[in-house]
Amino acid sequence: MRFPFGEIDILAQDGDYLVVVEVKTKSNLDFGAPYEMVNFKKRRKLFNLARALSARFPGQDIRVDVVSIETNNTPAKIEHFQNILEA
């Protein structure tokens, strides 16, 4: 789903939640794991995307998750981090 200020990689449903999923993939871990690429600036963008989605679907519970994929392993290492914007 695209908005003027960004796009949602995956939009999913998990029970009562509409889930914004950011997917990060890396084959080289020299500069950190894929999930570490979701820095303050990216989190702020994800927050704004979730807020725009909330305006489009009033009353809908929204959560932001990250899926981290490391392709330097066989099989690939996949991690799912739920609700990354929770304080």
Image (cartoon, grey):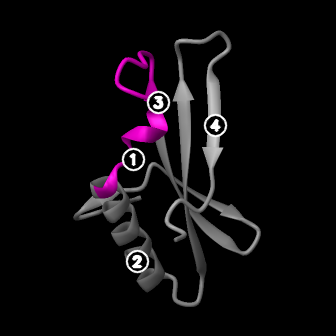
Indicate the secondary structure of the residue bearing disc 1: loop
- Looking at the rendered structure, which numbered label has been put on residue 51? 2
Q: Position of residue 26 (x, y in %)?
A: 43, 24
Using the rendered view, name the quadrant where residue 5 is placed: bottom left
Residue placed at 39% from the left, 47% from the top? 38
Using the numbered discs, state the Cα–Cα distance from disc 2 to disc 3 in whole angstroms: 27 Å
Residue placed at 57% from the left, 68% from the top? 63
Disc 4 and disc 2 in contact, CB within 8 angstroms: no
Evaluate whether residue 63 shows in this view: yes
Residue placed at 47% from the left, 81% from the top? 54
- Looking at the rendered structure, which numbered label has been put on residue 79? 4
Residue under numbered circle 3: 33
Residue in front for this viewpoint, 54 or 31: 31
Counting other residues with Cα less than 10 Å from the Cα at mark 4, is it few (<14), some (14-19), or many (20 or more)? few
Q: Is 63 rendered above or below residue 69?
A: below
Say which label, 4 or 2, has the lower sequence index.
Answer: 2
Residue under numbered circle 1: 38
Using the numbered discs, state the Cα–Cα distance from disc 4 to disc 1 in whole angstroms: 14 Å
